[in-house]
Structures are given as structure tokens and as C-alpha cells.
Image: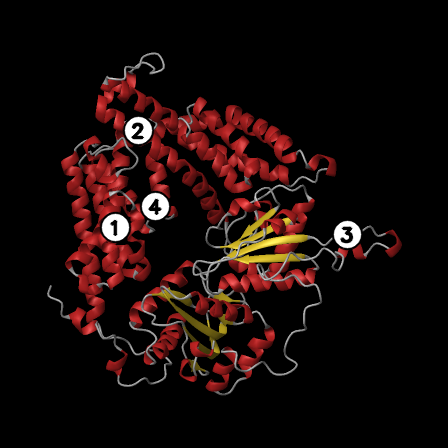
């Protein structure tokens, strides 16, 4: 690791007072030694990573980090702050700050070395030695592994038989220290007891630091708790899968992650605690206790929120994870599973209208009448298949909202509640409520302390039975009719929208579609639109048209901006711009994410402005759309296609113009002097080489 950090990359008197200033001070040192090619662009990548999740850890540690194309080689800079810098850790500011920079295509050996540093940060002796260093060269040597912590500071060696890291040896032997429960039994009466076995997976968006720190923290806590705990870190350097035999022998699973766990089906059916990666770092002992308690209650799998606490312990969710955040997670689970049904069913119905006209919806069943050579028969076939797919929308929505809250035991009550919502014409709103009711009922049943003889049948018999009965009663007798009335009122309101009210709704939905580019707010707007397609009223079709048009704007605008002012963008962004033409035309809003991640303060407001304009214009033009997806490829199915395209073009032009103006203003502005940075030559030498060229690009 010695080549990753030198004395020039160490600042033992870091004077920065904000995380941005600290990152700039350390990044300036990297740029001064030639390891960062574009300081501002690299800092934008750091800020984009920081916006995903704060990088502060308990114990006074801050680890801002990112992968960036502006990094020439894997690099580490270290700063020590007397006053401390707030990186979002729950216990206060960080005094030890590590800026980790990895190239976009960093080789696996260097990434593995950086992950090793992340594990060492969990060692109190290592951090104590860093706080005691008085010379940058000595600190660099310690971090680089050339110098060991002071004698006596190293932690005690693990006892014989300790669990190896995932992939470093065979499955741990069962003949280890007995579990704490067994220790209380007199020796003569003790039956052979094997230790409690846990498998864990850790992962974070970058896969460099938090992934391996959580793995180290869980392994230490496992040793202290006397359990066999084997971790599979899924990091940027790849991952070695746990031995299937180890998984099969495990009593429980801990998933500490902020990105999707790869090959998650391997752990299906085992008691699971599912949390964010920082929970694995900050409270590993609690997670082990939670999963052991869950296993003792009957072996049902549960899925928690992403930052601490499972559904069964929602009241003890980690700080910062409020009810609103959990509710959003549950709803997004349902929407994400519903969207494929929407796309398949909606596009088939749209295709049937293109072939046979809108009157094809009244055709007789193709099971009774189908002629291979008649276009109308094929149109009727597509319409009826699409209608069958659409019939699953509300049950799937309700079922997977319940699944997001209580995992598989919530599926049956959720689907039953959704089907009842369709039967009583409570529609999309009824599905939302049915899913939440089903998840809540199942979570309540899971809390019951049942006899050991019943635990085996709880997930397959008792929970589906009690959950379905309770949700059915609530939907039929208590909340069903009010929800149906509310659904009818919403449909009537959409049908009656005109003038300024319609324009205002289009403006709001358009801005929502472009705020997080495929994230939760985007999905809320999209779900609102597709929820009305089943009604096929004029108002709901106008809403669908406005939402799809606005969702096309961000990638199209970024593609246009890179085409007309390429000098304002990096080479990678210009390449992404070429792909964004196709993504935008296909209604894939996520095509703008690379641009927003690199420069969110300029890209996102510009995209929102263009999306809002497009949504408002689409509503004012009375454009309608029966297909929930397809972009320009379903324009022939749009009511008022010419004006619809005009609305998209207007929003695209506005967003592209704004992002070009904002980026150009940044390039023209003088770069601020970095706080607390060591001198690195004349100011001009710290300015990226290509910046003057970009600043004089013809307008």
C-alpha cells in the first residue's frame, strides 16, 4: 500500500471546517502530485458519492471516497483535524479523515488494498497510533503498512478455531466454544451443542470502504458473541461466493447493504435481518442479537429498512429512518413489481389499438372466435392478453407492498386484499391500502410468541390464514366502500380537469419525474399515472401523456447539451450523451443519471425546469396516451401527436439551455482557494489543463 500514500498526501493540521473544504484540501494534494487530472470534476464525483450516504463513522473517522475517471491511479490522502469535521457520523465530528480515490477502471489488486485499509480502520490500535503521529512521513508509513502500531497496542489474537474470512478456508468446524446458553448448563447434564451459525453479506455503492469495514465489524462482534459468523463482502474488487454448504448450515442471515445483494436467492427461507451497511459497522452486536431472536421465534424471513431495524422491530429503527422513509420503501417495493405488468399489458393494449382501432376493446373472446388471417383477430388477441396483464396490477401492487414489509408471509394476504380492492372497485388506492394493511397484520402476527410446535407451520398456514381473514374483513366491511368512493372522486376530478388546473397538475408531475431521475419521487408520479390507466378515462390518459413526455426530457436535454457545447463536458459525458438520445427517446429517464451524479446542482434544477414545462404544455394541449411506456415509439397512439412532440422539444431545449448556461458560468468563475491546503505551486498550476480551452469554446 506504500505507493498509494506519501508524506505529500498527509496533512496533520487540517484546518478545514466543512466536509467540502476538507475534501478539497486533500484532493488538492492529490492534484499537486499528479494523481487527479481535474480537481473540480473529481470533487463533483466525491460530492455525488457523499450525497448517497454520509461517510462519517463512529469513533471520529470520515472516509469520503469515490471512483472517478479523473483519478490517474489509486490514491489515498489523510488529514487530521483538531477541531473535527462533520461527516454525518452519529457520535459527532471526525478528526481522522481519509480521502480515497480510485480510478473508474481501477485494477482489482489496488482496490483490494484499499479494502484492507477499511478493515484496519476498525482496529482501535491503528487509529490510536494515527492520532499519536507527529510527522507526515511516519503517518504515511503507518497507513501504508510500512510501520506497525506501537507495541502493546495491537488487539489480542483471536482464539484458535476462529472463523476465517469468506473464501479463505474451509467451513468452520463445529467443535468450538459452546454457545453462551450452553455454558449455563452443568457439565454433566450438557448435551453436545454446536455454536449458532450466521452468514452475512456486506456491500455499499462504491464497494471500497464501508463494505469491508462492516465485514470486519461483524466478524469481531461474532467472535465476542461466541457465534460462527462468515461474511461475504461484495465489493468493487469482486466477491467470492460463500460455500453453499456454509449457507445451508447457517441458522440465520445478516444482510448489511446499500445496494442490491447479488444472488440473494441463496439465502431464501432463513431468518434474516436486512439493514443498511452502516448498521453493520455501528451496531453489529445488536444485529447478531436480533437475528438470533428472530431464529428463536420461528424461522420466518423478514426484510428490514435500509438503515437499521427489521419490520418486526420497526419501532427501534435506526436514527434518521422515520415513518415516512419506511412507508416510501414499502410503496416502492409494490410499484417496482407492478411496473413490468404495466409495461407488458399497456403496450399490448396500445398495439391492439394501433391494429384494430379503439373499438377492438369490445371484440368477443378470441377463445371463441379467432381467424389467423384477420388483423382484427390479432388485435383482439393482443387487447385481451394486455387486459389480462392489467388485471394483475392492483393485486401485484398490494401483494408486493406487503412483501416489502413482511417478506413472503405477506404475499398471500396482500394479493387477497388487492383482489378484493378490484372486486369492490376501490382501484389503485384500494390496492395501496390493502398492501399496507396486509403487511401490518402479518408483522403483528410475527410478533406473537407462539409454542415451538407451531413455529414450523406459521409461515405456510397460520400467517396466510389469519392474515387473509383479517385483511378481507377490513377491506370488505371497514375501509372498502370509503376507498371506492375516493377512487371514483379522483377519477371524476381527473376527467374534469381543464385550463389552469390541468396545467398546474402537469407542471408538478413533470417536475417530480425529473427530480430524482427514476428514484422514489419519479416512481410516485409514474405510479399515479399508470394507476389511472385501468379506468381509461380522458383525464387519466392526459396525465399518462404528461408524465411520459416529462420523463423523456432529462436524457434528451443532456444529449443535446453535449452535442452543442461538448467542451463543457468530460469525454465520458460526451459518450454518455450519445447513448442518452436513445434512452430519452425510449422514455428511460435514468439516462441522465451520470450527468446528475457528476454535477447535481446544475443538472437537476435544469432537468426539473424542462420537465415541468413539458408536463404543463402536454396537459394544455390535451394530449392523451393509452400506453404506459414506449417513448416516441408509441407516438402514433397519442392523441394530438404533433403538439405532444412540440411539448417534448420545448422542455428539452429549455433544460439544455439552462445546463449549458450554468456550466459555462462555473467555468468562467475564478476557482476559490482551497481551505487548509498546502501550497502546490502557483495558483494556475492547480487549474486543470483543459479548462482554458473549454472557457473559450465558441458560443
Query: Residue 430: percent from the left, percent from the top?
Result: 44, 30
Pointer 3 and pointer 1: residues touching (CB < 8 Å)? Answer: no
Label 1 and label 2: CA atoms lie apart by 27 Å
- Scheme of image coloration: secondary structure
Of badges 2 and 3, the one in the foreground is 3
Dot 3: element: loop
Q: Which mark is residue 348?
A: 2
Disc 3: which residue: 193
Label 4 and label 1: CA atoms lie apart by 12 Å
Of badges 3 and 1, the one in the foreground is 3
Label 2 and label 3: CA atoms lie apart by 58 Å
Dot 1: element: helix
Q: Is residue 72 left or right of residue 669?
A: right
Q: Which callout, 3 or 1, points at the residue further toward the start of the chain?
A: 3
Dot 4: element: helix
Work out whether 122 lies above or below 628: below
Q: Which one is nearer the viewer's eye here, 692 or 249? A: 249
Q: Which callout, 1 or 2, points at the residue further toward the start of the chain?
A: 2
Number of numbered discs:
4
From where the camera sits, is residue 219 visible?
yes
Disc 4: which residue: 522
Of badges 4 and 1, the one in the foreground is 1
Q: Which callout, 4 or 1, points at the residue further toward the start of the chain?
A: 4
Of badges 1 and 2, the one in the foreground is 2
Q: Which one is nearer the viewer's eye here, 403 or 161? A: 161
Pointer 2 and pointer 3: residues touching (CB < 8 Å)? Answer: no
Query: Residue 444: percent from the left, percent from the top?
Result: 61, 38
Amino acid at each position: 500500500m506504500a505507493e498509494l500514500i506519501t508524506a505529500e498526501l498527509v496533512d496533520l493540521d487540517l484546518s478545514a471546517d466543512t466536509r467540502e473544504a476538507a475534501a478539497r484540501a486533500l484532493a488538492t494534494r492529490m492534484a499537486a502530485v499528479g494523481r487527479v487530472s481535474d480537481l473540480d470534476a473529481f470533487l463533483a464525483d466525491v460530492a455525488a458519492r457523499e450525497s448517497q450516504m454520509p461517510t462519517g463513522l463512529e469513533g471520529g473517522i470520515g472516509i469520503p471516497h469515490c471512483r472517478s475517471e479523473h483519478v490517474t491511479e489509486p490514491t489515498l490522502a489523510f488529514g487530521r483535524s483538531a477541531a473535527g469535521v462533520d461527516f454525518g457520523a452519529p457520535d459527532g465530528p471526525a478528526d481522522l479523515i481519509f480521502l480515497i480515490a480510485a480510478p473508474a477502471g481501477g485494477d482489482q489488486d489496488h482496490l483490494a488494498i484499499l479494502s484492507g485499509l477499511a478493515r484496519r480502520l476498525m482496529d482501535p490500535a491503528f487509529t490510536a497510533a494515527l492520532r499519536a503521529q507527529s510527522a507526515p512521513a511516519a503517518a504515511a508509513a503507518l497507513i501504508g503498512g510500512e510501520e506497525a502500531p506501537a507495541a502493546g497496542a495491537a488487539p489480542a489474537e483471536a482464539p484458535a478455531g476462529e472463523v476465517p474470512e469468506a473464501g479463505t478456508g474451509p467451513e468452520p468446524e463445529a467443535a468450538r466454544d459452546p454457545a453462551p446458553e450452553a455454558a449455563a448448563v452443568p457439565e454433566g447434564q450438557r448435551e453436545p451443542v454446536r455454536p449458532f451459525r450466521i452468514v452475512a453479506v456486506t456491500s455499499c455503492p462504491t464497494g471500497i470502504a464501508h463494505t469491508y469495514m462492516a465485514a470486519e465489524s461483524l466478524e469481531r462482534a461474532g467472535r465476542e458473541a461466541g457465534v460462527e459468523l462468515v461474511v461475504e463482502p461484495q465489493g468493487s474488487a469482486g466477491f467470492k461466493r460463500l460455500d453453499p454448504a456454509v449457507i445451508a448450515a447457517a441458522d440465520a442471515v445478516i444482510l448489511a447493504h446499500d445496494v442490491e445483494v447479488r444472488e440473494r436467492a441463496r439465502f431464501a427461507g432463513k431468518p434474516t435481518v436486512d439493514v443498511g451497511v452502516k448498521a453493520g459497522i455501528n451496531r453489529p452486536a445488536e444485529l447478531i442479537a436480533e437475528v438470533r431472536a428472530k431464529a428463536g421465534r420461528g424461522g420466518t424471513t423478514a426484510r428490514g429498512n435500509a438503515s437499521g431495524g427489521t419490520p418486526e422491530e420497526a419501532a427501534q429503527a435506526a436514527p434518521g429512518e422515520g415513518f415516512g422513509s419506511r412507508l416510501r420503501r414499502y410503496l416502492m417495493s409494490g410499484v417496482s413489481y407492478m411496473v413490468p405488468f404495466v409495461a407488458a399489458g399497456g403496450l399490448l393494449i396500445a398495439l391492439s389499438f394501433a391494429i384494430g382501432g379503439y373499438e377492438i376493446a369490445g371484440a368477443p373472446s378470441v377463445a371463441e372466435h379467432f381467424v389467423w388471417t384477420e388483423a382484427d383477430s390479432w388485435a383482439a388477441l393482443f387487447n385481451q392478453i394486455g387486459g389480462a396483464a392489467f388485471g394483475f396490477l392492483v393485486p401485484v401492487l398490494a401483494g408486493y407492498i406487503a412483501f416489502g414489509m413482511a417478506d413472503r408471509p405477506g404475499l398471500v394476504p396482500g394479493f387477497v386484499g388487492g383482489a378484493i380492492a378490484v372486486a369492490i372497485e376501490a382501484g389503485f388506492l384500494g390496492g395501496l391500502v390493502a398492501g399496507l394493511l396486509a403487511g401490518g397484520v402479518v408483522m403483528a402476527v410475527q410478533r406473537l410468541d407462539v409454542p415451538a410446535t407451531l413455529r414450523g407451520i406459521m409461515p405456510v398456514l397460520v400467517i396466510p390464514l389469519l392474515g387473509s381473514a383479517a385483511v378481507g374483513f377490513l377491506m370488505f366491511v371497514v375501509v372498502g366502500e370509503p376507498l371506492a368512493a375516493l377512487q371514483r372522486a379522483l377519477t371524476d376530478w381527473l376527467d374534469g380537469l381543464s385550463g389552469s388546473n390541468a396545467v398546474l397538475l402537469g407542471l408538478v408531475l413533470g417536475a417530480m419525474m425529473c427530480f430524482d431521475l427514476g428514484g422514489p419521487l419519479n416512481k410516485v408520479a409514474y405510479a399515479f399515472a399508470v394507476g389511472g390507466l385501468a379506468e381509461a378515462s380522458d383525464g387519466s390518459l392526459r396525465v399518462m401523456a404528461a408524465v411520459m413526455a416529462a420523463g423523456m426530457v432529462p436524457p434528451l436535454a443532456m444529449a443535446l447539451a453535449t452535442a452543442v457545447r461538448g467542451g463543457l463536458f468530460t469525454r465520458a459525458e460526451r459518450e454518455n450523451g450519445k447513448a442518452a438520445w436513445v434512452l430519452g427517446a425510449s422514455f428511460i429517464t435514468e439516462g441522465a443519471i451520470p450527468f446528475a451524479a457528476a454535477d447535481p446542482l446544475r443538472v437537476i434544477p435544469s432537468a426539473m425546469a424542462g420537465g415541468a414545462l413539458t408536463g404543463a404544455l402536454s396537459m394544455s394541449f390535451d394530449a392523451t396516451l393509452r400506453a404506459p411506456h414506449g417513448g416516441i415509439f408509441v407516438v402514433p397512439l397519442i392523441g394530438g401527436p404533433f403538439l405532444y412532440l412540440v411539448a417534448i422539444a420545448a422542455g428539452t431545449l429549455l433544460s439544455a439551455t439552462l445546463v449549458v448556461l450554468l456550466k459555462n458560468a462555473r467555468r468562467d468563475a475564478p476557482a476559490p482557494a482551497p481551505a487548509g491546503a498546502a501550497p502546490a505551486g502557483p495558483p494556475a498550476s492547480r487549474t486543470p489543463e483543459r479548462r482554458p480551452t473549454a472557457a473559450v469554446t465558441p458560443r
